[in-house]
Amino acid sequence: MRRLALAFALLFLITNCKQTPTTNTNLLHLIPQKSAAILRIPDWEVFNETLKINEPSAVLNETGFYNTLLEYADLLKKFAPKDDAYLAFVALGDNDFDLALITKNHPKLLQTDSVFTKNITSYEYEETTVNTITSTKSPLYFLNNEDVFIASTSKLILENTILQNNTGRDPIDLSLEQMIKTSDNGSPNIYVRGSYFKRLFKTIIPDFKFLDSEIPFQWLALDIDLDNKTALSLSGVLTSEQNGKQTFDLLQDLNPAPSKLIPNAPAQCRGVIGFQYEEWESYKNNLAKKRNASVKGFSVPLEDYFASINELAVVYTNEQNLLLNYSNDITISEKALAPISTKSETFRALDIYKISDSTFIKSTFKELLNPPTVNYYCTLGNLIAFAQSQDLIKDYIANYQNEALLKKTPAYNTLAKKMSDASTLTYYGNTNLLATYLSGKVSKTEAKKLKAIDFEQFPAAMVQLVQADDFTYVNARVDKISAANAAAQVVQTASVQLDQDLLNAPQMLRNYRTKGQNILVQDIGNTLYHIDANGKIEWKKELDGPILGKIQQVDLYKNGRLQYAFTTPSHFYVIASDGTIVKPFDLNYSNISQPLAVFDYSGSRDYRFVITQGNTLTMLDREANKVKGFDYTEAPTTLFKAPQHIRLGSKDYILVQLTSGKLEILNRRGETRIPLKETFDFAESPIFQNGSAFLVREKNGSLITISQSGKTSRKALGSGSEIQYDRLNSTEALLLPEQLSINQKAIPIDLGLYTGLKVIKAKNSYYVAVTDLQNNKSYLYTSKGTLLSNFPVYGASELDFGTLHNSKDLGLTVKGESDSVLIYQIN
């Protein structure tokens, strides 16, 4: 790997030279025979300048790899090629490559000074002088005669070149010469030899596993276009030996066609590769040749099915891979699948089928696409989705119905407009997710460098192969996507099935390790589930009853490791994030009537826990001891809601709503702080803070402001029990029949049965959430009243919303089917 770094260093740093070149291809016979890849640069000055201003290329300079390049800067800047130059990456053993630079010699190619020349030593080989430059890490060898200049990181490569030249055993590689003739002579080009492609790839990504060791192609030749500073474009050709043995021989005689599946891949997939074919018999004949079978007698399972479709796509996700097919005639496709299909269930009005042959697609396309084994499928119009699990099928159905698809993303649309309309093989990748995936297949040091790359402005890459005549044309592109044009995209990333139906709505709670969220939910059997942001159930715990209200988070040990605190009708629990009970908070009570109240008066984490039993209140400290000095242990009547703590300025207030309509406003000791004679017909809402005052909502829609002196004033919000209201700091939301109001901005809404109106703060912004239970639609608005893109999404309960995997990304959770929890990610 060290040698490869030096090779790239030479490639990068030599571009700092500024000379006027002339094109010359008479150097080809000096290119080492074991060259895996060759870079040809016709104009050093232009290449250098465009590389500096090309933004996609500059993104790589943000990594630690740039420091490796700088290590050789002083040494390698001494070379100044004037004419055409070739940089050959030459195979060295199994895991590394050396580099050779070949160019025409000229008097000023080697710039010398007194310090530099002291590090040059020479020796004779086959009557040729070989010079050596010794750096602190690795030596560099070079020779320069009247005609050519050759430098290499390998002494053996240089000596073999001399020997070949002296003996006349240095013929030009005719296949390489042919590829060069197809290239744009005025732009930089890169040539990759197919027989070394997999070795070269594994040198960069060591833990990547190829399906086989077969040679995929003969040569790949690409022109490098850096002229557009906000894009990196590659175009060229890929050749095979056309003997039926190489992977891309499978594309012979296939006509390109527009992809119908790539645009319909989930928006948050890591990548997707699609294969378009309109001639099943042509592909089958190619496959027979590849497998050394007789074309005439060759057959595969379910041929009628494959003849009825014209495109397949493998979608790469975090866990399993999804397989999409597109049918020319869905009736014929369904009939062909019927003998191996059994209906499994119906999900959102779509039938999901189980199939008895899980490998029939994989066995037919394994050489080209390596599709996954599949156990289930469903049809959506002419599109057929296959997967190993029903959950993945359900996730895709949800994303398809929510239109959380690539065709709705600016990144895909920007790239697709600049690529060919028709192709034979198409790959689209999410650069950020790809970097995360590949970081798990390199060393920890290289992974850290890879993760350091900021792909925010370059979120995607696209590659197309277009089969025509005897060539496969290649196009690849990365484009800058302005953040201003990138609309939010919501994608269902998981559907988590519980053992029984949900008892309450799922709740998001902070994961102190990732700074994202965990999801907690209880089923009707009183089992509590702890689910991570990816939808994995981490643990389950049986409780003695339903959780009252919301689960609270506390930091009992003041070390940042958070615990979950809540009550059931007969128990007070504090549970650690690993599911163990935190002693001594495993306390039995009788007839607990309200959710747990948690007070942290000054933010010091010296918590006060209040247990409500009818009209009796018990206050405990962070060690589960009863708090002495809190005198409000018995209320005149039963409590309407759990006590609340609100801090106004430097004063603490404890607010207690009673079923009699009385509102007690107390100090820390439980003594009356603000006496009120007026009674209220409380709505199912907490007491809100409004600046330096309190807000109380009544069932008739009135909103009462209570000052710290006890004065009250009323405001009518509307009439009727259907009114919902919520407020957080200065953001307020009001739900009336057929109208939602956010900060006094009226927003028309459809008729429905709405629940869960709440204002939520996430990433320093405020949002308003609400769910229509009648139509199973969950909505999310900004504080300015704008509905987020791709909302509403499917939801059957109030939703919870916040950062999801870490402190940067956003997501939400909501009930799906009666026994499932849905997780959506907002991009």
Image: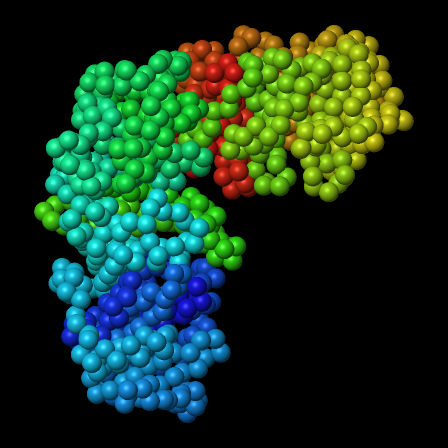
Asked where in the image residue 806 lies, by quadrant, the reply is top right
Asked where in the image residue 779 lies, by quadrant, the reply is top left
Residue 366 in percent (x, y) is at: 30, 37
In the image, is residue 202 above or below residue 301? Answer: below
- x 65%, y 27%: residue: 689
Counting labels gives: 0
- x 21%, y 47%: residue: 245
Compare residues 295 and 526 and report the one nearer the observer. Answer: 295
- x 44%, y 82%: residue: 134
- x 60%, y 16%: residue: 523
Query: Would you say 264 lies left or right of 244 here?
Result: right
Residue 206 in percent (x, y) is at: 43, 54
Compare residues 126 and 631 and report the one nearer the observer. Answer: 126
Q: Quadrant of the C terminus?
A: top left
In the image, is residue 332 above or below residue 693? Answer: above
Query: Would you say 530 lies left or right of 78 here?
Result: right
